C-alpha cells in the first residue's frame, strides 16, 4: 500500500489484522479510493493467498443476470442454458470473493447470499444439489448502507453479517500527504508501460497536485499522471500538462457537465442512447463514464431500454437462485 499519512498507516495496521482471520470484511469509501486494491491486499496476506481472488461488481451486471453470475446455473435452467456454468462463488472456492458495489445487489438475492454466509453452501440456479464451498467474502460500497436499509433496499441482517470487520477508506482530499507518493508510484508504472524517460514533477506540478481536490480520488490521480506521461516532453512533468487541474482545483463542477439526477442529465442520457442504438459500451464512451456509472444513471432516472440491457446475453435468466 502506498502512502504515509496517519490514515494510511491505520489502514495498513487493520489490513494486517484482517489478514489473520476468515471473517467477512466490509470496505467503505468513495468511488475511486482503491477498495479493490485493499481487498487484494487482505487476500494476498492471508492463508488464502494461494487460492483464487475473484472480483464481481454487483452494479456492472444487469439485475436479471446477477443470480446466475454469482451462483451459476444448471443445464436447462432457462432458455439458452445449453450447459452447466459455474458461478463466481464456485470459482472463488478456497480463496476470496470480492463483491464490489454490494449496495446495488438486488434485494431478492440478498437472502441467498446471507444463507451462504451462514451455511457455506449454495445451489446453482435450476439445480437441486447443495454445494459446500470454502470462500471468504470481502465486500465494498460507496453508498450509505444504513440509508439503503431504511429505504428497504438492503437487508439489515445481511449488513450485520457482512460488517463483521469494517475498513473505511477516507477520500484522497482528506489525506494530502499521500498525493505525491501515489503520484510517483503511478509515474513509475506509466514510465514502464509507455517506455518514457520521465523522472518526476516540477515544483509547480507538485503544488498543483497538492492543491487539487481529487473528486475522483486515487483513480483520477492515476489517470492524470498517465496522461501527463504520454503527452509531456522532457524529464519532468510541468503543471501546464496536468490536464483538468488548474481550472477546478477546488473540485467545483465543470461547466457544461449536467448535475447528477438533473433533467439535463436525463435529456443527455436519452439523446445519447438514441444515437448509439442503446449500446451500453458506446453510450458510456460517449458520455465519458464507466459502464457501472451508466447503469447507475439508468436506474437513477428510471430508464428502461427498449431492447433490454444492451450486450447482455440474449437468453433471459431468472433472478432467483434456488
Image (cartoon, helix red, strand yellow):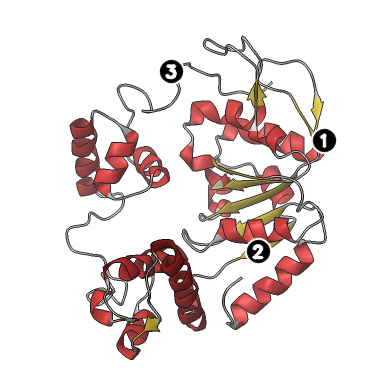
Quarter of image, res 83: top right
Q: Is residue 136 left or right of residue 223?
A: right
Residue ranking furthest to the bottom? 203
Earlier sequence position, callout 2 versus callout 1: 1
Does 288 appear above or below 210? above
Is residue 102 visible from the viewing direction of this image? yes
Rounded to the nearest whole Å, what is the CA distance between mark 3 and mark 1?
33 Å
The image quadrant where one finds the C terminus is top right
SS at mark 2 in the image: strand
Tag in front: 3 or 1: 3
SS at mark 1 in the image: helix
Number of numbered discs overlaid on the protein picture: 3
Does 55 appear above or below 131? below
- Residue occupying the point 58% across, 46% down: 102
Quarter of image, res 126: top right
| Structural crowding at the residue carrying mark 2, measured as other residues with C-alpha within 10 Å and reported as few (<14), some (14–19) or many (≥20) | many
Q: Are marks 2 and 3 in contact (CB under 8 Å)?
A: no
Rounded to the nearest whole Å, what is the CA distance between mark 2 and mark 3?
38 Å
User: Residue tagged by mark 1?
Assistant: 119
Q: Are marks 3 and 1 in contact (CB under 8 Å)?
A: no
- Residue occupying the point 77% across, 61% down: 19
Q: Nearer the viewer, residue 251 or 193?
A: 193
Q: Looking at the rendered structure, which numbered label has been put on residue 314?
A: 3
Residue 109 appears at what percent x and percent y?
A: 62, 32
The image quadrant where one finds the N terminus is bottom right
- Residue occupying the point 57% across, 74% down: 2
Quarter of image, res 224: bottom left
User: Residue tagged by mark 2?
Assistant: 167
Earlier sequence position, callout 3 versus callout 1: 1
Amino acid at each position: 500500500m502506498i502512502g504515509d499519512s496517519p490514515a494510511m498507516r491505520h489502514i495498513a495496521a487493520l489490513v494486517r489484522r484482517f489478514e489473520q482471520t476468515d471473517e467477512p470484511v466490509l470496505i467503505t469509501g468513495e468511488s475511486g479510493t482503491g477498495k479493490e486494491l485493499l481487498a487484494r491486499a487482505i487476500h494476498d496476506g492471508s492463508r488464502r493467498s494461494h487460492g483464487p481472488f475473484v472480483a464481481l461488481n454487483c452494479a456492472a451486471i444487469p439485475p436479471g443476470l446477477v443470480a446466475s453470475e454469482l451462483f451459476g446455473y444448471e443445464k436447462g435452467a432457462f432458455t439458452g442454458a445449453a450447459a452447466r456454468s459455474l458461478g463466481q462463488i464456485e470459482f472463488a472456492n478456497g480463496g476470496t470473493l470480492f463483491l464490489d458495489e454490494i449496495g446495488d445487489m438486488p434485494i431478492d438475492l440478498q437472502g441467498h447470499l446471507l444463507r451462504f454466509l451462514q451455511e457455506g453452501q449454495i445451489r446453482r440456479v435450476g439445480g437441486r444439489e447443495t454445494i459446500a464451498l470454502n470462500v471468504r467474502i470481502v465486500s465494498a460500497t460507496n453508498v450509505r448502507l444504513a440509508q439503503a436499509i431504511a429505504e428497504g433496499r438492503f437487508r439489515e441482517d445481511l449488513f450485520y453479517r457482512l460488517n463483521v470487520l469494517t475498513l473505511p477508506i477516507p477520500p484522497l482530499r482528506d489525506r494530502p500527504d499521500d498525493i505525491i507518493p501515489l503520484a510517483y508510484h503511478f509515474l513509475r508504472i506509466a514510465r514502464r508501460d509507455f517506455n518514457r524517460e520521465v523522472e518526476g514533477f516540477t515544483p509547480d506540478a507538485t503544488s498543483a497536485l497538492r492543491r487539487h481536490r481529487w473528486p475522483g480520488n486515487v483513480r483520477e490521480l492515476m489517470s492524470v499522471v498517465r496522461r501527463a506521461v504520454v503527452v509531456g516532453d522532457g524529464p519532468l512533468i510541468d503543471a501546464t500538462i496536468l490536464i483538468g487541474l488548474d481550472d477546478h482545483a477546488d473540485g467545483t463542477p465543470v461547466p457544461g457537465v449536467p448535475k447528477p439526477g438533473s433533467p439535463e442529465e436525463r435529456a443527455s442520457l436519452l439523446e445519447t442512447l438514441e444515437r448509439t442504438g442503446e449500446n451500453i459500451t458506446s453510450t458510456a464512451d460517449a458520455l465519458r463514464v464507466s459502464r457501472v456509472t451508466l447503469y447507475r444513471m439508468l436506474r437513477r432516472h428510471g430508464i428502461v431500454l427498449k431492447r433490454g440491457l444492451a450486450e447482455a446475453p440474449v437468453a433471459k435468466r431468472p433472478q432467483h437462485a434456488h
